[in-house]
Structures are given as C-alpha cells and as structure tokens.
Image: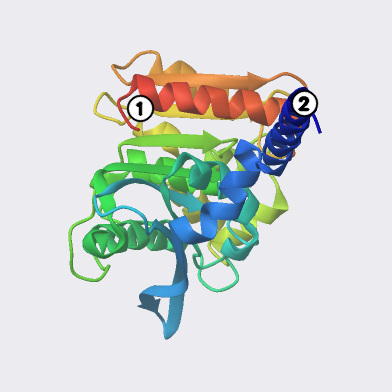
C-alpha cells in the first residue's frame, strides 16, 4: 500500500470515528434525562403534620450534586379543594427539575376529609415544614416560590398573600418562611364567587361541607386572595387561558387589576383561546419562557 493510500485510509478511519462519536452523543434534553437520577434525591410521602389522626404527606425532590441552599418550588395540585392528588404532578414539575431547583409537592386534606379552611392550614404547615427542614434538603428559605394549578393556584396565592392571618398557628413548632414569589396557574381568586356568586359551581361548594350558606360565604371571602391585596406582597405571576370554562378568566384579570393599584410586582400572561390548563407544547414553552424571565427580573434564580 502506498503512502498516499495509507493516508487516505487513515483519513477515512478518522472520519468514521468522528462520525460515530457525534452520533453517539446525546441531545441536551436526553443528557438531562439520563443524568437526573444522579442529580436528585427523591423522598416520597414524608409526613409533615398529623391532623385528626391523619398523616399528611409531601414529596421532596432535592439536589444531591450540591451542598449549598437551592431555590425551591412549593407546588400544590388542583381539584377545587375536593379532588386531585400530589401523586399526579410529576410531569408538571419536570421543568423545575431541569432548571436545577428543589421541588416540594404537597398533599393536603380534601373537602371530604376536612372542610375549609383545612387545605389552607395544611399548605401553611407544609411551608413551615420546608423551613424547619431546610438544612436537610438544601432549601434556600429566601428563594421559595409557591405555585399550583386551579385550587393549587389559589393555595399558592394564600401562601403569598395571607401569611398574617395565622393559619400556621397550630402547625408543628418552627418558623414559617415567607415566599419570595407566587406563580399562579389559573387559580381561584374569589372563592365566594364560585360557591355562591355568578359562577357558582357545585364542586367547590363541597369544600365547605355542611356550613350554612351565610357562614360559607363569609369564610369564602376571608379565603379569597382578592380580600388580601396590599402593598407588601411578593411578586405574583398569573397564567390563564382566556377561554377557561372552570375558573373564570375574570378571576385572574381582577387580581391583576387590583394589584395595579399597589407597589406589588406582578404580571398576567394570557393564553389566547386557552382553556383550564392542558396547554399546547408551544403554549407551555411560552409560559416557561415567561416564568424564567419573571424569576430573573425579581432576582430569584
């Protein structure tokens, strides 16, 4: 074989080697999926409080590849406070794991177990648990973001807007952190409206059990974020489709309009034609682009 032929053979072998290496490389998304198990600890069904002999559970996804406190999402599921489960939320929190955040997914007492305001009380106890156990799970208590969908969006808003109401007074000993921001996915902002107003719905009414209507409405107003708009709130981002047939689109608009008269940093992202969640891939990409910008603008990364 001539020197020239040997050189050509070497070049071909080198090209084949490079091609095979390139083909063997994973995409960024595939690499993250392959590595996530080594980057995170998953602690399921941790008891954060016991109420009426019922152990309430939460799941923690915490970074195992860092030693310093990390930004943390506290996430609540939806279901009009009477349905749903923390165990169905894995796909909703994947973008946060990809961002490198810790995530705490909260289960709470549903209306059939305990009427309002039990779900709110439980959510505050879960937040206190996160603060008490921050060192164990590398939770940065200065960068806790509350979020949730539908009823979970309402509960996230309560964490950011009702801390002065004392819903955590009977939680296990500890200090309840203040949330740094709220990301509200189509949450109820006027509870009275959906149990006794123009948008009355039999499902959320079940959250109030056998209360007399007047008592239920009075409590609903107390539990409504619209009743707690003031200047000292954390930044709030609301996400909602303008064709939502479950939680009226007007709820998010009303909250945003009320916040316009305060010093609170707030944004409202409307998904044109969007319903009650179940957004398209393109819409979700837009949503998370907005979320990331919102967090960066407010110094929460």
Quarter that holds the N terminus = top right
Q: Residue at x 45, y 21 (%)?
A: 293
Left or right for 295, reference 232:
right
Residue 8, which numbered label? 2
Residue 251, percent across and down?
A: 57, 29
Left or right for 193, reference 179:
right
Left or right for 276, reference 75:
right
Q: Residue at x 43, y 40 (%)?
A: 157
Residue 247, percent across and down?
A: 66, 37
Q: Quadrant of residue 17?
A: top right
Residue 267, percent across and down?
A: 47, 19
Q: Secondary structure at mark 1?
A: loop
Q: Which sits in the foreground, 137 or 148? A: 137
Q: Looking at the image, which residue sits at the far front?
A: 2
Residue 153, percent across and down?
A: 52, 42
- Check disc 1 and report the residue beneath it: 235
Q: Quadrant of residue 192?
A: top right
């Amino acid at each position: 074989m001539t020197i020239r032929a040997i050189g050509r053979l070497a070049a071909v072998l080198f090209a084949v080697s490079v091609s095979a290496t390139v083909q063997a490389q994973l995409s960024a998304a595939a690499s993250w999926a392959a590595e996530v198990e080594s980057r995170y600890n998953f602690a399921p069904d941790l008891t954060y409080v016991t109420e009426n002999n019922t152990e309430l559970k939460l799941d923690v996804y915490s970074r195992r590849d860092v030693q310093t406190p990390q930004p943390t999402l506290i996430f609540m599921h939806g279901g009009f406070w009477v349905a749903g489960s923390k165990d169905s939320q894995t796909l909703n929190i994947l973008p946060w794991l990809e961002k490198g955040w810790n995530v705490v997914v909260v289960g709470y007492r549903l209306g059939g177990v305990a009427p309002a305001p039990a779900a709110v009380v439980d959510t505050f106890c879960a937040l206190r648990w996160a603060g008490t156990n921050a060192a164990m799970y590398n939770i940065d208590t200065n960068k806790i973001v509350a979020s949730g969908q539908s009823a979970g969006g309402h509960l996230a808003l309560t964490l950011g807007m009702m801390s002065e109401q004392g819903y955590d007074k009977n939680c296990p000993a500890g200090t309840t952190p203040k949330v740094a921001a709220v990301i509200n996915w189509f949450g109820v902002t006027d509870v009275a409206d959906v149990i006794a107003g123009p948008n009355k719905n039999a499902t959320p009414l079940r959250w109030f059990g056998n209360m007399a209507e007047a008592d239920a409405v009075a409590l609903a107003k107390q539990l409504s974020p619209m009743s707690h708009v003031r200047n000292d709130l954390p930044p709030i981002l609301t996400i909602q489709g303008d064709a939502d047939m479950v939680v009226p689109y007007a709820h998010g608009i009303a909250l945003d309009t009320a916040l316009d008269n305060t010093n609170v940093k707030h944004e409202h992202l409307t998904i044109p034609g969007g319903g009650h969640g179940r957004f398209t891939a393109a819409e979700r990409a837009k949503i998370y682009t907005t979320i990331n910008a919102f967090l960066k603008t407010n110094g929460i990364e």
